[in-house]
Structures are given as C-alpha cells and as structure tokens.
Amino acid sequence: MIHKLKVERAFRQYIGAVFEYLSSSETCLVRGWPDKRLVIREAFRIQELANRRTELRFEYLLKEHGAEDAIWSSFEKISRIWDRIHDGWQSIEEVALKKGSPAYDRLTAEIDKLQSALDPRALEGPFQDAQRDREYLDARGRMQDRIRELESELVTSSAR
C-alpha cells in the first residue's frame, strides 16, 4: 500500500510542477511576443486542459486499481506513469471515464475543439525565442529537477 501512496503523491506533485512550468512559460512567451498573446494563451490553455485530463485519468487508475495491484510497483519513473496514462490508455478506460464523468467528457471535447482551431505555425517564433530566454530556461530546469527528485523518491519506495 505504501507504494501506491508514494506513486499518488509523486504524480500529484508532478502535475503541480507542470502547471507551474506552464504558467512561467506562458509569461515568458507573451513578454517576447505581445502581439501573439491570444494564440499563446490558446496554446497554453490546451496544455492546461491536457494536464487536467492527465490528472483525471490518473484518478481513474487510483479508483480502479487496489493498493496491492502490481500496476503500482511498475511505476518507477514519472515517465512510466505518463506512458500508461497516455500511450497505454485503453479505449475501454476512455469510454468508462467519459461515461462516469461528464466533466471529463466536456474537457476532452474542449481540448479537441481548441486543438483543431490552433495554428501551430503561429507559435514557432515565440517558442524558438523562448529557448534563449533565461527565465523560461530556469522554469524548465526547475521542472526537470523536480521530476528527478520525484523519480528518486519512487525508486526508493520501489526498492523496499
């Protein structure tokens, strides 16, 4: 049971770190490209919603898998959890979550709608410039450091 709780704690903290990174990143991009404020806001809105979708999928796994389930011991890295929630997400889980959560269904529909309207070419300049922005690079570095810390905690708990 301890490992499930550690996985839950680590992944929730990861989700929080992503939200912090998104907020800092958006500020940097808008500062450098104020004329693209609206398209940048839309792009980051999609990322925020996608992060929320990831969080809801994780909550679904928490409810569906008991503390003793082997799934929890397979999550030694944040990337393994992320892969399971995205690449390993099954259509039956998607159907069940949409059916059981109208909010999840609306969220997914909103992501699809926003993605279809977004012009990724409009973001090329801002994202390229961000690669040279010290504040942006610091925010990305903080998130990467936090992920390493969380993964270290997961490895420690899975070794027990």
Image (cartoon, rainbow, N blue to C red):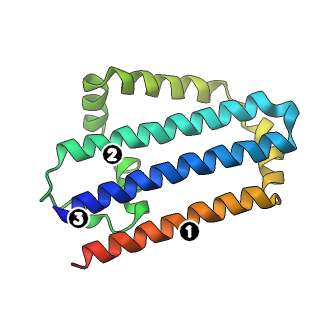
- Residue under the image location 27 percent in, 72 percent down: 157
Q: Nearer the viewer, mark 2 or mark 1?
A: 1
The residue positioned 77% from the left and 47% from the top of the image is 28
Vertical arrangement, residue 25 with respect to residue 1, above or below? above
Give the residue type at disc 3: His
Horizontal side of 69 relative to 41 (left or right) equals left
Q: Is residue 20 left or right of residue 14?
A: right
- Mark 1–mark 3 distance (CA, rounded to whole Å): 22 Å
Q: Given the image, on which type of amino acid does mark 1 rest?
A: Asp
Q: Which residue is mark 2?
A: 58
Which tag, 2 or 3, sits closer to the chain's start? Answer: 3
**Which label sits on residue 145?**
1
Query: Which amino acid lies under the numbered mark 2 shown in the image of this protein?
Result: Phe
Crowding near the residue tagged with mark 1, few <14, some 14–19, many ≥20 C-alpha atoms within 10 Å? few
Tag on residue 137? none
Residue 74 at x, y percent in the picture = 27, 65
| Left or right side of 149 for 37 | right
Placement of 80 over or under 12, stated as above or below:
below
Which type of secondary structure does the marked residue at label 3 adopt?
Answer: helix
Q: Of discs 2 and 3, which sits in the foreground? A: 3
The answer to which of marks 1 and 3 sits earlier in the sequence is 3
Which structural element holds mark 2? helix
Depth check, front residue: 88 or 53: 53
Residue placed under numbered mark 3 in the picture: 3
